[in-house]
Image (tube, rainbow, N blue to C red):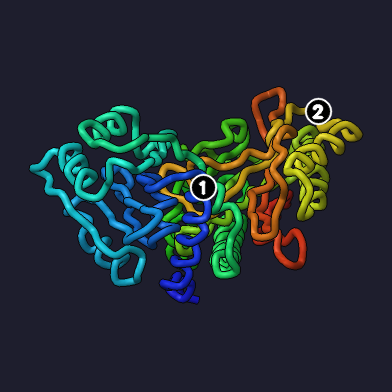
Amino acid sequence: MNAAAFAFDKQEFEQRQQRLRVEMERNHLSVIVVSVPENIFWLSGYQTKAVFTFQFLLFPLHGPLRLFTRQMEITNAIAAHEAGGFAEYELYQDDQDPMQQAQYFLRQHLQSTDKVGLELSSWSLPAQRAQQITQNVQVSEWTDASTLIDRLRLIKTPRELMALREAGRIGDAISDRAQDLIRPGRGENELAAEVMTAIVQEGSEYPGSWPNIMVGQRTGRIHAAWDGTIIQPNDHVTFELTGVVQRYHAPSWRTILVGDALPAVRHAAEVLVKAQRAAIAAMEVGRPMRVINQAVEAILAKNDPQCSVSKRSGYSLGIGFPPSWGAQWQIGLNSLVEDPLQQGMAFHVVCVGHLAEGRAVCIGSTVALTENGAEEFTHGGLFTANQD
């Protein structure tokens, strides 16, 4: 199915905007300068691959939404405007100082009595820019609104879950194609070429981060792209891949054994499969998020994997732009997180183990809490390579 079939309409954006306004009233905020690309997209549908561009969405408690962006992005602005994501947009030219233009824009649309939120933890709004755009702009208060919108995004609507489920279907198709190529003599570059081709052919958008593809000793690098390493007899391969639909990412992580893989690798992977299954089984609405990692630790206490296992059993996900598919302020699933699990949340539930000799095994899948409980949208896990 074409990804455009999962596009969001004006009604969806209005519902999201209303949820934010409720939180703004609770926090006594008049306006938020939204600079995080994922948050701008979630609220308005505006997107560009040029996330390095200085841009923001001015989101008032009352009144129209206004986008401020570079002239180069005019067609993207028009598309979001026509979709009903915001009422107005203003552009600056490349021969203008974007900070000065932003100050002028803010002075036009802010009142001296406004309490204005900034996403100060955003990598899209570094400290220097945040300081510059607020100079000579008189408001009642500038305050940090980091994570406010991100936390709203944790709970996804049925339409968002549809996009995420389709991203998972595509991601599994990409993973299956890569896995079919695994055999001694083939290399990481061949796997990467198949993955990059499959991303396009299977209908995925570009991912927020490169695929992680590693063979043998390189598996311990965890977040590493390909470098040409050749698969050896009795080796193993790990790859973390994702499909993307309407910017929603649904990754999985597979460990594939080749021939008679090292006993230590096989043992560690088998234990982590049990741990990851227990983590998913622990996901129930109303329980604190810490139960996910605690379920993993309970399995490890009874079944020594003989490797060092990360104390973080995954993270929240959904919309993603470069440089990450996990968004800027994801929640890491360690044993300290007390936030309650709620229907509509989605996570990449991952178990990562480092072996003594530098190798690693990784087991992960995208899991969402739906009306049916914990539902897997992707199929990560432990696999055996074809022997032909």
Residue depicted at x 59% and y 60%: 156
Q: Amino acid at mark 2?
A: Gln
Q: Residue at x 76, y 44 (%)?
A: 288
| Circle 1 crowding by C-alpha within 10 Å: few under 14, some 14–19, many from 20 | some
Nearer to me, 376 or 178:
376
The residue depicted at 21 percent of the width and 43 percent of the height is 107
CA distance for labels 2 and 1? 37 Å
Q: Is residue 92 left or right of residue 9?
A: left
Residue assigned mark 2: 306
Residue at left offset 29%, top offset 29%: 131
* Foreground label between 2 and 1: 1
Outermost residue toward the left in this view: 95
Amino acid on which the number 1 mark rests in the picture: Asp
In the rendered view, does 360 fall on the left or right side of 62?
A: right
Which residue is nearer to you in this view: 311 or 63?
A: 63
Q: Is residue 132 above or below residue 124?
A: above
Residue 10 shows up from this direction: yes
The residue that label 1 is drawn on is: 150
Residue 329 position, x and y percent, is: 52, 40
Is residue 386 visible from the viewing direction of this image? no
Q: Is residue 243 above or below residue 109?
A: below
Q: Position of residue 82 (x, y in %)?
A: 29, 71
Categorize mark 2 by other alpha carbons within 10 Å: few (<14), some (14-19), many (20+): some
Looking at this view, name the residue that lies furthest to the top: 356
Residue 44 occupies which quadrant of the picture? Answer: bottom left
Q: Nearer the viewer, residue 97 or 373?
A: 97
Against 258, is 129 above or below?
A: above
Q: Earlier in the sequence, mark 2 or mark 1?
A: 1
Image quadrant holding the C terminus, namely bottom right
**Side of 55 relative to 215 (left or right):** left
